Image (cartoon, coloured by chain):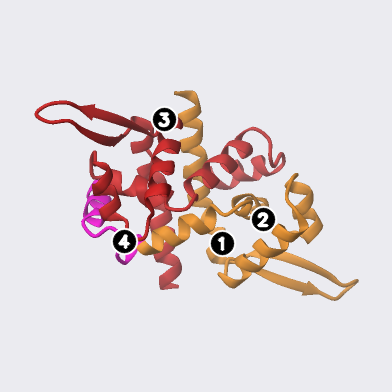
Chain colours: A red, B orange
Amino acid sequence: MSDSMLEKNNQNVCQNICNDFHSTIEFLGKRWMGMIIYSLFSGPKRYHEIMDNIPGISDRLLTERLRDLEKEGLIVKRILSAPKRKVEYELTQSGKKLEDVFITIIAWTQAKNES
Amino acid sequence: MSDSMLEKNNQNVCQNICNDFHSTIEFLGKRWMGMIIYSLFSGPKRYHEIMDNIPGISDRLLTERLRDLEKEGLIVKRILSAPKRKVEYELTQSGKKLEDVFITIIAWTQAKNES
């Protein structure tokens, strides 16, 4: 499947599938984006929990990325009021499905480092 | 495999595998990087052929990205002298293996657009 699929797409680089691919890979590759999504695979998290998981990220960038992810429908912001008010971020179904993508990236990286 | 693998990694976000993952996804997500790699899946290409395949990319960025890819061992620059001198860029074995990553990204994007 793989060869023929990409081979065929290559005939029309930058049309349809390819444009979508282009947007996705550059979205996921934005600074800290991958790590934020990654940190949410283990379940919903509060803002400061995500922050604690990612040394080096700034407040401004975390806020911006969470907004990007919400806008793209990859996370939802949940406001809980009881027993006390708290805000949590959770991956949507679509966001959770990125796990397959992340697993192939990790596998490729490990293979590259071992070669 | 998938759940337990990422679950386990999440316990040590930003260590080892996770740092590598972070570097890889941000490398692949650099502006135009994905499209340049994509255009090389169908075989070695000359500079202007890559350029023609990617409307919108600038000379400066294409040159810079090809240099990044060469430095990371994902492409080789081949200089052919006969019958006349020409320069071609070709994916290495490691670069070719990115096809698996790209296929999962395309599949995820298509599923997201259809949902």
How dense is the environment of label 2, judged by Cα within 10 Å: few (below 14), some, or many (20 and up)? many
* Label ID, residue B95: 1
Percent position of residue B86, x then y: 84, 69
Circle 2: element type: helix
Amino acid bearing label 2 = Leu
Front one among A63 and B77: A63
Q: Residues within 10 Å of mark 4 (few under 14, many from 20)?
A: some
Q: Which residue is mark 2?
A: B40
Q: CA distance from mark 3 to mark 4?
A: 25 Å
Q: Is A60 left or right of B11, judged from the image as shown? A: right
The three-letter code of the residue at mark 1 reads: Gly
For mark 4, name the chain. B
Q: Closer to the camera: disc 1 or disc 3?
A: 3
Magenta stretch contains residue B8: yes
Report the side of A9 relative to B21 (left or right): right
Residue on which disc 4 sits: B14
Q: Which residues are magenta?
A: B1-18
Relative depth, front residue between A108 and B7:
B7
